[in-house]
Amino acid sequence: MSLKGKRIFITGGSRGIGLAIALKAARDGASVAIAAKTAEVNPKLPGTIFSAAEEIRAAGGVALPIQCDLRDENQIAEAVEKAAVEFGGIDILINNASAINLTGTEGTPAKRFDLMFDVNVRGTFLTSQAAIPYLRESAKLGRNPHILTLSPPLSMKAKWFKNHVAYTMAKYGMSMCVLGMSEEFRPDGIGVNALWPRTAINTAALAMIPGVDIAVCRKPEILADAAYLILNRSAVECTGNFFIDDEVLASEGITDLDRYSVVPGTTDFLIDFFLD
């Protein structure tokens, strides 16, 4: 397996899961465009597109930092085009960027509702839309194109909606993009899949959830390793799936997951949202 020479576009990859996926690919010698909003150091959040680019280069990859606000369709189109021109095309799109706000219906301001839908649903849809022509060309060249979206398996159980209706709808909107686009672009040979963690992952987004103990979480690298396996599979055969990280690893015989634990030896993890 290798992602050497792959041309990858990642949204929101300046930190956390997106950066972990970028670094995994970079170690093979992939070219990675990081399209994220953070260009200046924020004392509350680690990482910028430039620090991410430095890490990607240090890992052995080619990096292209692009400041991009996913709420702006023009910025999305320009970012995707910039990456395609710089790399000579795009083979892989990672829809990683996501906004979270775990509030009930009465406690969700319109601006927070709009942010989640603009970034999660609209951003995923429009970035995928912009990348499709390049991914279709990648398929014609036999380069095994993929779209991988960080979103959960779909469920109509009320318990996943009742505490944060807006957030659940926004995340499921990303998943519905996967569901529809996997069939829409199956004839083009573009693999479209979703990936979601079994347990809570220690990221900056986790810090927005009060009372979460990181000792019962796993590291972003478990998703990076799972993504790596998915992206190396045949796009023609592997599409329309809602993968769970540990199940992907187990399918390749990887069952000892202790190295992904924030605290080695932990066995009682906090299960992530949307999974029974």
Image (cartoon, rainbow, N blue to C red):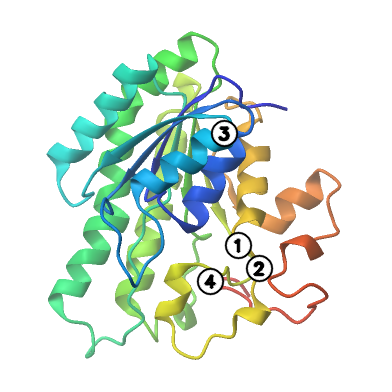
Residue 81, horizontal then vertical, whole percent: 25, 25
Q: Classify 80 as above or below 219.
A: above
Residue 182 visible to the viewer: yes
Quadrant the C terminus occupies: bottom right
Question: Mark 3 or 2 closer to N-term?
Answer: 3
Q: What is the CA distance from the residue labelled 4 to the residue labelled 3? A: 31 Å
The first of marks 2 and 4 along the sequence is 2
Residue behind mark 2: 218
What's the residue at 53%, 74% (across, down)? 273
Disc 3 target residue: 26
Structural distance between the alpha carbons of marks 2 and 1:
9 Å
Give the x, y percent position of residue 257: 79, 61
Determine the CA span between mark 2 and mark 4.
17 Å
Whether residue 192 is visible: no
Q: Which residue is mark 1?
A: 197
Looking at the rendered structure, the kind of residue marked 2 is Arg
Label 4 sits on residue? 274
Three-letter residue code for mark 1: Pro
Dot 3: element: helix
Q: Position of residue 269 (x, y in %)?
A: 70, 78
Tell us which disc is closer to us: 3 or 2: 3
